[in-house]
Amino acid sequence: MSQENPYEKFLDGRPVVTILAETSNAIAEYLEVIGADEAKVPPAPGKWSAAEIVCHLADCELVFGFRLRQTLAENNPTIQPFDQEKWAKVYPGVPASEALETFSALRKWNLRLIRAALPGAAGRKMTHPERGAMTFQIVVETMAGHDLNHLGQLRKIAGKHE
């Protein structure tokens, strides 16, 4: 079984590394419009607040970074999935600014790795237990599509505060 990038539908034609490099600034701009207090408020019952979305992005950046490094260091590793809802249980009360600071630091570090590894490592393989065979490039594309998906959510929340 093999699956391409599940977030491919969000990619907008820009180079994926450009998307990855611009995400931290885009998050900061949306959070400025939303405001610190409103960032804590979910937009609807059962939905994550803006702060929780940024916490999720920080957690995912940690996971993506590990997966990329594992793929470079090992031959066709099996990567570890995670339950985002279980991880999200600790998000309430975390300031959006703290989550953004964490995300930005991790993203900067991961971008350094990605730029050094591509294009040479693009085809390095890994296996996701739920998604099947993937490559380094697909994970990088997944990161970019995942960013755009959540930036769209933050844009909607910010739109209610403009």
Image (tube, helix red, strand yellow):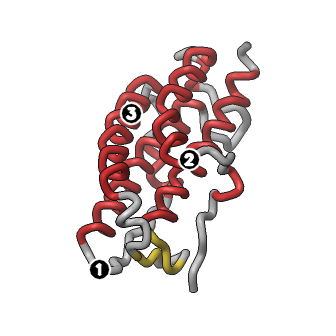
Q: Which mark is residue 104?
A: 3
Q: Name the residue under label 1.
A: 75
Q: Which residue is drawn at 67% across and 48% down?
A: 13
**Gap between marks 3 and 2, in whole Å?**
19 Å
Q: What residue type is labelled 1?
A: Asn
Q: What residue type is labelled 3?
A: Ser
Q: Which amino acid does label 2 sit on?
A: Pro
Residues at discs 1 and 3 in contact (Cβ within 8 Å) = no
Q: Quadrant of residue 120?
A: bottom left
Q: Estimate the x, y position of residue 47 in percent, counting from the top left.
A: 66, 41
Above or below, 68 against 75 in this view is above
- Reading the chain from its start, which is encountered first: label 1 or label 3? 1
Q: Name the residue under label 2.
A: 15
Q: Quadrant of residue 108?
A: top left
Above or below, 74 against 118 in this view is below
Q: Which residue lies furthest to the bottom in this view?
A: 1
How crowded pointer 3 is (Cα within 10 Å; few <14, some 14-19, many 20+) is rated as many
